[in-house]
Image: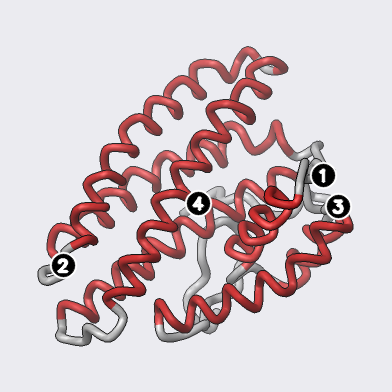
């Protein structure tokens, strides 16, 4: 893929753009993992069916929540400062309304993995839709977020735990020096929670995917294993 943006700004610092693109990386990474897991199940290894089914529910909630945050926060903020982005954002919000029914269909498909055909079809459709959707966000909107270099303090302890879990999820597969720059822009109370959340996420990866292995990337595109 050409013209893929770097996660860090040109000056080597992290920003809200970095955090958003790390989420993009996580969605791409996990859809690829679902495809591999479904292939394994189809070939007769059903040891992790329950864990994969549960992980789909987390993915559904995560992607839907990401889009809600964009529609209700990120996108209106960008339009308020850059009217030229309105048409692009309207198209992206329309994509969100197309993705939600796919996620609902995915719930039914993953509920019964006695055959994996329906679930794999949903995963492939989401990969195709998100490929263009995320690329548009990265090309058209990320430049507007590069100057925002402070993550807002979580309003309460519940939000603090959710943010820590979210960063643990999105950091998996990101180059270590980029992770350090992300830590630098986060509130201290959130930084303190992330190491434990990352350890818990590693355990979850082992349970769901059978491995914690991932590539190491500097862009929102997952790197190949061992890359």
Cβ–Cβ under 8 Å for marks 3 and 1: yes
Q: Position of residue 198 (x, y in %)?
A: 66, 72
Q: Secondary structure at mark 1?
A: loop
Secondary structure under tag 2 reads loop
Q: Could you tell me if residue 18 is visible in this image? A: no
Residue 7 placement, left or right of 25: right
Q: Measure the alpha-carbon separation of dots 2 and 1.
A: 42 Å
The residue drawn where x is 22% and y is 76% is 39
Q: Nearer the viewer, mark 2 or mark 1?
A: 1
Q: Which residue is mark 2?
A: 116
**Disc 4: which residue:** 2
Which of disc 4 and disc 1 is earlier in sequence? 4
The image's mark for residue 153 is 1
Against 203, residue 86 (above or below) is: above
Query: Label 3, label 1: how many angstroms apart (C-alpha)?
Result: 6 Å
Quarter that holds the C terminus: bottom right
The circle drawn on residue 216 is none
Which badge, 2 or 3, comes first in the chain's sequence?
A: 2
- Most distant residue in the front direction: 157
Marks 3/4 in contact by CB < 8 Å: the verdict is no
At 31% from the left and 33% from the top, the residue drawn is 98
Which residue does the numbered mark 3 point to in the structure image? 187
Residue 7: quadrant of the picture: bottom right
Label 4 environment density (alpha carbons within 10 Å; few <14, some 14–19, many ≥20): few
């Amino acid at each position: 893929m050409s013209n893929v943006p770097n996660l860090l700004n040109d000056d080597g610092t992290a920003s809200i753009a970095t955090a958003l693109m790390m989420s993009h990386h996580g969605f791409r990474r996990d859809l690829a993992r679902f495809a591999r897991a479904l292939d394994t199940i189809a070939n007769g290894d059903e040891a992790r069916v329950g864990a994969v089914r549960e992980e789909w529910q987390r993915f559904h909630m995560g992607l839907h929540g990401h889009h809600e945050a964009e529609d209700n926060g990120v996108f209106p903020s960008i339009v308020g400062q850059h009217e030229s982005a309105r048409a692009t954002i309207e198209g992206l919000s329309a994509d969100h309304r197309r993705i939600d029914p796919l996620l609902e269909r995915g719930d039914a498909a993953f509920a019964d993995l006695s055959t994996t055909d329906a679930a794999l079809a949903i995963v492939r459709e989401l990969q195709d839709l998100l490929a263009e959707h995320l690329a548009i966000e990265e090309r058209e909107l990320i430049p507007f977020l590069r100057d925002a270099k402070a993550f807002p303090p979580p309003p309460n302890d519940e939000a603090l735990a959710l943010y820590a879990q979210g960063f643990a999820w999105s950091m998996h597969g990101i180059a270590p020096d980029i992770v350090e720059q992300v830590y630098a822009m986060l509130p201290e109370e959130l930084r303190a929670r992330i190491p434990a959340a990352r350890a818990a996420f590693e355990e979850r990866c082992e349970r769901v995917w059978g491995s914690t292995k991932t590539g190491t990337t500097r862009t929102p595109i997952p790197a190949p294993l061992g890359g």
